[in-house]
Image: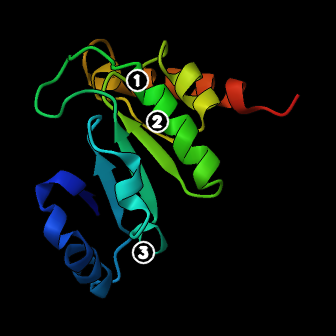
Amino acid sequence: MLVHYESDPAQIMNIIGQLRSYGWEVSVALNIETPIAVIDPLVAEIDCVQCMSVHPGKQHQPFLPAVIERIKNLRAKYPTLPIAADGGVNAETIPPLLKAGATRFGPGSAVFGHGDPAENVRKLQKLIHRLTLKK
């Protein structure tokens, strides 16, 4: 289950606890303006942090490059925590996101915005596989 931190910052720990009580994995999404330090007290209770790389709400927004530095900082602070990126994720943005430390990707428009969604997924998977092969 994914919960946006900004939905109720004062109750986020209670929300995480309730989701955990159902046996669910829990991820917390952070908007680009939210300091990454807000997950410090949550990190032991979450399975993933998702960095929004657009402002939530509308499809086809431009990718916000500031997310790259956020992901680098999260990766340095939490080397084993899965980090997702969502918004503007496509064949052009996956390489720098991956290099920064992202391990999961939410490529909505890159999958459903044109052509055959299944083929689009295969192309993105092939790209990620090629970029993550040990050299």
Residue at 19% x, 29% y is 55
The dot on residue 30 is: none
User: Which mark is first along the chain, 1 or 3?
Assistant: 3
Q: Nearer the viewer, mark 3 or mark 2?
A: 2
The dot on residue 70 is: 2
For this rendering, which residue is in front, 4 or 115?
Answer: 4
Question: How far from the left and from the top, in percent, is residue 59?
Answer: 16, 23
Residues under numbered marks 2 and 1 in contact, where contact means CB atoms less than 8 Å apart: yes
Question: How far from the left and from the top, in percent, is residue 101?
Answer: 60, 38
Q: Residues within 10 Å of mark 2 (few under 14, many from 20)?
A: some
Residue type at the position of mark 3: Glu
Q: In the figure, 58 relative to 17: above or below? A: above
Residues under numbered marks 3 and 2 in contact, where contact means CB atoms less than 8 Å apart: no
Residue type at the position of mark 1: Ala
Side of 17 where 73 appears, left or right:
right
| Residue at the extreme right of the image, as rendered | 135
Can see residue 113?
yes
Q: Residues within 10 Å of mark 1 (few under 14, many from 20)?
A: few
Question: How far from the left and from the top, in percent, is residue 54?
Answer: 26, 27
Residue where numbered disc 3 is placed: 45
Residue where numbered disc 1 is placed: 66
Element class at badge 1: helix
The quadrant of the picture occupied by the N terminus is: bottom left
Q: Nearer the viewer, mark 3 or mark 1?
A: 1
